[in-house]
Image (tube, rainbow, N blue to C red):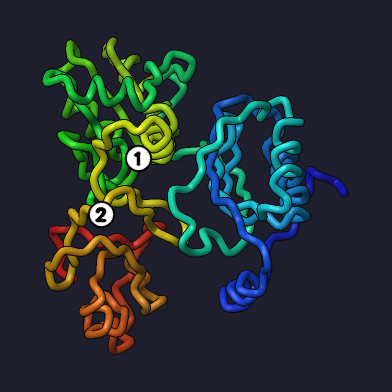
Amino acid sequence: MDNNRPYPSNKYGKEDLIKRLDQEKFKRKTISFYRYVLIEDPVYLRNSLYREWQQLGCLGRIYIAREGINAQMNVPEPQWDAFFKQLNDRKEFSQMPIKYAVEEKAPSFLKLAIKVRDKIVADGLTEDDYDVTNVGKHLTAQEWNEALEKADTVVVDMRNFYESEVGHFEKAILPQAETFRDELPEVLSMLEDKKDKKILLYCTGGIRCEKTSAYLKHHGFEDVNQLHGGIIDYFRQIKEAELPNHFKGKNFVFDDRLGERITEDVIAHCHQCGQQCDTHVNCANQQCNLLFIQCSDCAEKYNHCCSTDCQEGKTPPPFEGKRRIFHRKSEV
């Protein structure tokens, strides 16, 4: 096969994919990993990985760019050793740090999608805006807790507002941006008078903090630190070492689970009635597909839709973005 040519992608419908997963007699491991590394030919690599991972039965969403790889996926447990060997056999991905999902309550992905992008995380930055080789100090969970407990440290959540809404670290600054691209200048503005402070950054798995720490150091911040492995690996570390947990609520994830519980604290509210709830859903009206928080009572009342208009099958207004997301200032 010519690996420079487009490789065929999945053609099954959602119902067929769910049925195929239901018939499986084995378990899957949901994992994530990333690495900033020069990829000479992203298209060739994409097609090679698609062929290899499809043969192993892997599912997930993977982005490849000249600057590296960003992967969220699940791997059949019987194929784990073969998958890990293939990963390590590639010099770009040798000894890759892997983050394992906190919960495996539902299938995380239904299909395999590997896409070539300009960036592995859309950030809106140019090469003159940061130096990815000059990043912040990576902190273990224990080091993170020790720094977090000091009064003069500044903690910043580098995720989107709908992620931090359902779970975040104590005393964290929570930017209200909808995208990482918008969040970077917002955070820079918020921290403008704090360049002499110890800055702590965290995100889901660490990839956004890698860019942010380089971006902040480029703008004159010196004591920049990031949580090694993000929220996902923090939870693993505190369990293994029996450390205090300073994260409250859920960890939002970008797969079909939409979240994994870290603590029993419910810090968010239903966007329709206001009662305590942290369950993200997509509006059942597929023409809308709004991402929002909905309690079980409202799910029944609105037939899993975000509004009476969607419940009645009315077409929502045009939307040009990639994801429809509930905003606090708008009516649902």
Q: Quadrant of residue 93?
A: top right
User: Could you tell me residue 182's position as x and y percent?
Assistant: 29, 40
Which residue corresponds to mark 2? 264
Q: Is residue 259 left or right of residue 17?
A: left
Which residue corresponds to mark 1? 180
Q: Quadrant of residue 221?
A: top left
Residue placed farthest to the right in the image?
1
In the rendered structure, which amino acid carries the disc numbered 2?
Glu
Above or below — where is 243 with respect to 153? below
Marks 1 & 2, CB-CB < 8 Å contact: no
* Callout 2: SS: loop
In the rendered structure, which amino acid carries the disc numbered 1?
Phe
- For the point 36% across and 69% down, the residue is 282
Which sits earlier in the primary sequence, circle 1 or circle 2? 1
Q: Is residue 208 visible?
A: no
Q: Quadrant of residue 34?
A: top right
**Residue closest to the eye, 326 or 35:** 35
Above or below — where is 199 with respect to 102? above
What is the CA distance from the residue labelled 1 to the residue labelled 2? 27 Å
User: Could you tell me residue 79's position as x and y percent?
Assistant: 73, 50
Q: Is residue 326 left or right of residue 85?
A: left
User: Could you tell me residue 180's position as x and y percent?
Assistant: 35, 40
**Residue closest to the eye, 250 or 308:** 250
